[in-house]
Image (cartoon, helix red, strand yellow):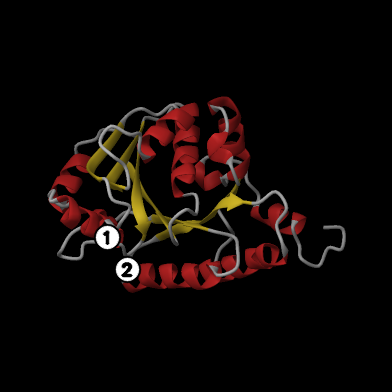
Amino acid sequence: MAVLFVTGTSTDVGKTVVTAAIAALARDRGARCAVVKPGQTGVEDDEPGDLSSVARLSGVTDTYELVRYPDPLSPAAAARRSGRAPMDPVAFYDRVLRLDHDLVLVEGAGGLLVRFDEDGTTLADLARGLQAPVLVVAGPALGTLNHTALTLEALAHRGVELSGVVLGSWPSAPGLAERCNLRDLETLAARPLLGALPAEAGRLSPETFLEVARTGLGPQLGGTFDARQFRSTWDPSRRDL
């Protein structure tokens, strides 16, 4: 069983959509895939959460949400305000290790070092505990280089393997900053991008989303994305853009 953690450099960078895209490709090739969300915040008990979006887009319905809190805060802060118990790391490990799948995706909440409990447990700790790699979902706009560098440095400092970097929401008409950031993000990661999904991909039908996932994620994630070609397409030195 392969386990892959998915984190973001911040909130709203497309982490859930990237998770759904990986799950969609896994399902399409016949792999048994499960998705685990250690902590969901900002959603009432009767409302659909991130895993509902993953299931709708990918068709993967084997999903597990460990804890949920209504306030849009970090899991630790949301647990305090709700009076509910925080996410239990032991229960998380038990849940993941009891799964019998080809691929288990673990989607974090917020960024890599957001706290899940009062002991300071983070997604990086959970990934290290399972000796699993982490995929970093980054935004393309101004400010992403610092956010991404800090995330990658935190992973390296904790001895957690980096799977790669994916852009979770690439605009249809990227500006100069977005186009220049492509090269710099690859420099920070010391490897080519593993993908770039278009903005608003989460609103697509499942059928169209599958094709977008295939062209937007690299072979390591089951797709056909070519980082060199993508970078060439949006080369900031081109005058026709």
Expressed as whole percent of the image width and height from the top left, the position of residue 40 reads: 29, 46
Image: 152 above or below 75: below
Q: Determine crowd level at label 1: few under 14, some 14-19, many 20+ residues with C-alpha closer than 10 A.
A: some
Circle on res. 226: none
Q: Looking at the image, do the residues carrying marks 1 and 2 touch, with CB atoms under 8 Å apart?
A: yes
Amino acid, disc 2: Gly
Rendered view: 235 above or below 109:
below
- Residue under the image location 25 percent in, 36 percent down: 45
Residue appearing at x 23%, y 59% in the figure: 77
Q: Earlier in the sequence, mark 1 or mark 2?
A: 1
Q: Is residue 195 visible?
A: no
Mark 1 to mark 2: distance in Å?
7 Å
* Residue of label 2: 159
Nearest the viewer among 237 and 194 is 237
Quarter in which the N terminus is drawn: top left
In-front residue for pair 223/174: 174
* Relative vertical location of residue 137 with respect to residue 33 in this rendering, above or below: below
Disc 1 marks which residue? 128
Q: Position of residue 105 (x, y in %)?
A: 36, 43
Q: Identify the secondary structure beneath mark 1.
A: helix
